[in-house]
Every structure is written in structure tokens, then in C-alpha cells.
Amino acid sequence: MRKKVRRKEYTELLNQLDANCSVSEPSNKRVKPVAKSNSLTGVITPVKTPALKRIGQSISRSISFRTDARPLPPAPLRSRTKASSFPRRRNSQCWSDTVESHDLTAKEIKRQEVIYELTQGEKQLIEDLSLVKKVYYEPMLKLDIMTESELGQIFGTLDSLIPLHEGNPYELLVCFQLHPNKTVGEVGPTLLNWFPCLEAYVTYCCNQVGAKALLDHKKQQKRVEHFLRLCQESSFSRKLDLWNFLDLPRSRLVKYPLLLKEIQKCTPPDHPDEDTLPDALELIQSIVAEVNKKTGEAECQFYRRGLIYLEESQRITEIHQSRFLYCHGELKTNKGQKLHVFLFELALVLTRPVEDREGGQMFNVYRQPLPNTLINLEEIPDSEAGGGGTFRGAFTGGNDKDRRMEHSQGSNNRTHSRPVTV
């Protein structure tokens, strides 16, 4: 009886959220490098409405970035009677859809499209983050699905990120709306003013390592798993899970250098932005680099704390002196035994995953860790990589390279070789 009441309570809450969130829906765009459009060479003057829209749509496709928020595979059979259970899509609108005609060159059209993409992305991110708080954090706290402390660890400083995107980026959006031609002139000064605020991402992204581990652990509880599954099946989630939403800020942050580079390409030499855009690009690149560095250090510390040493001799100084983790993942021995391998900055550690008293994941150190001075890492071609000897880390930041690892051992200097991905 209690389960029926609980399920009814969940369902009523989700139906209410579904009705209230018909507009605020998460973004589902994917990140890919900005592509060059060969069709934009030359000057188009004047540009009529149909041509402008065709060019704008082509540009919109070329600057469409992807995030890590990917929907689940659709079910094999779709029932028409359950249309509301399938994800809604945001209307994809490019700048050329908002104007009738302009006497602009193709290069200037592309510039306006990228700036418009920047402003719309900010607007959508605010909607997404507000949605996360409304449909996940508050209901789970209200229904006592997780404690306030647990939710605080998982959501981190998410609340503090929303105001960061409500200020200066909206100035550009207002420019689009107020300018008679719906165009934006300078963006460099606005971005230079705003980018220092994004240093707050260091705290949020550093917390993500522990947040992901705690969320995965809590999903093992039936109440948590049931609630998150109901949310994911509801239309407001667009089939994305909670972690997809929590990772949106990081995904958004790494887009800014790509967007600025594209704006810079389309900016003529005599434009006022010619002097400020390089400074803005350098600033945001330094912030992204700092976030990556601090996140890497936080990840390294997190997994170091999870190591359980069965012998005192396993506590080699190279592990504790390591500042970052190249990669980690599962490998199998020749006997089929599964091991979790950590390639730290200064040491290679083989472990066996175990659970602590509370069900959290820990790692028993297996045999003697190896200092990296005893290991040779050799880069190998993609065609030779793969197979059972490769593993890929969860936080490699897209810098994966295939290399062969060799370990020299014993008086005969025997060499053991295994390909790894780092």
C-alpha cells in the first residue's frame, strides 16, 4: 500500500512538473569542431530573403555545437497513444530566420549567426539549469529521496552559475532585439567584461568528480532509481538523465573558445572587435585551462583517497606526489580476472574494486605499484590500437592518445608490453 501511495505521489508531482515545463526544456545539441563553409566565399550584395535564410541555415549547421548530453536510444516500437512520453525538441532557429533582408556580405552574415548562437546558447543554459533545480533538486528534497547534504554534494554550486549567465550575455541579446536591423556590432568589450566571472566554474567542475561517484552510488537505492527513471521517461527531460543536465555547464564552458575563434574569423580587419577579440579569446582559454587543471587535480585526489593499501610497501611516494591522473579503466588478466588500472602522473597502480561499509566504491591495491620511471609509454597508430588491452579514462578531456606501455622487470631485463589509451 505504501508503495502505491509513493508511486502516486511521484506521478502526480511529475505530471505537474511536465505541465509547467512545456517551455523550459534541456538543450540536446552536440559538440563538434566549427566547420568552414565553402559556399560563403565571395560577396553577396544585396542579399534577398530566401538567399539569406538559405545561407543562414547552412551557417547554423556549420556552427552547431554538440554537448555530452545525448538522448537514450529510442524504443524499437513507438506507440502513438503515448506521444507525451517522448522527448520534445527545441525549435532550432538561426539569426537569418529573425530578419527579412539585409545588404550584408556572406562573411558578416556568418558573424551574426555565430553571435546569435552565443546568445541563444546562454538563454538555453539558464533554462536548463533552472529546470534542473525545479524538477530534480526540489522534488527530491521535498519527497525525502535524498538528504539535503547529499543533494548539496551532487548539485554543488549549480545555483551560483545561473546569475553568471544572466548579465553581460543578455546585453548582446538585447542588442539583437533593439537594433533596427537585428544585428550586433561589438562583442569584444562585453565578453572581456564577463569572462572573469566564469572562474567560478573551477569550484563547480572540481566537485563533479565526487558528485558523479555519489550519484552513481545513490542510484543503487530503489527510491532514487525509481524517481530518476520516472523523470527520464517524462517529456520535460527529453530522455536525458540527471548527469547529462549536471554536466551542461562544463560542456558550455569549453564551447566559448570555439565560438570566439569563429567570430574572429568573420571579423574584418577594420572592425572595432579586431583589437578586443584576441584578448577575450586568450582570457577564456586561460580560464578553461585553469578549470581543466584544477579538475584534474581534484580527480587525482579523489581516486588517491579511494586506494586501500594491503601492505605498507605499496605506499610508494610517486602515488602521493602525483598531481593528475592520465587515465583509468578496466583491464583483464590472462586468466580473465578484472582489474581497475590507474595511470597517475608518476605511478601505475593495479587495483581490485571493492565496496566499503556504506556501499561506496573503493580500490584494493593489487601487487606492487610501478613508478612511471620503470615504464616506457610509446605512441602507436590508431590502426594498431584497441583490443582487450586498451582502456579509456572518464575524464581524459578529449586528449586520448594510443600508446604502448612497456615495463622492464628482473635481472634479465625482461620487457612486458601492453597497449593502453592515455
Image (cartoon, helix red, strand yellow):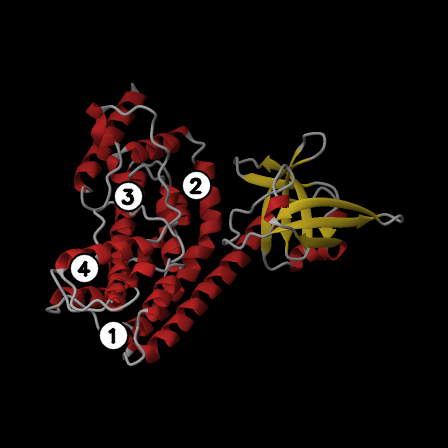
Between the residue at mark 1 and the residue at mark 3, the CA separation in whole angstroms equals 40 Å
In this rendering, position of residue 201 left or right of residue 166:
right
- Find out whether the residues at labels 3 and 2 contact each other: C-beta distance under 8 Å: no
Q: Determine if residue 157 is in view.
A: no
Question: Which of labels 2 and 4 is toward the front?
Answer: 4
User: Label 2 belongs to which residue?
Assistant: 215
Q: Which mark is residue 52?
A: 4
Q: Which residue is mark 1?
A: 186
User: Residue 113's x, y, as percent?
Assistant: 25, 61
The amino acid pointed to by label 4 is Leu
Residue at the (20%, 23%) spot, across then down: 81
Mark 1, secondary structure of its residue? loop
- Residue 17 vs 205, above or below: the answer is above
Measure how far apart labels 4 and 1 are at the Cα level. Answer: 22 Å
Q: What secondary structure is found at the residue carrying circle 3?
A: helix
Nearest to N terminus: mark 2 or mark 4: 4
Kind of element beneath mark 4? helix
Decide which of 71, 236 is in the foreground and name it: 71
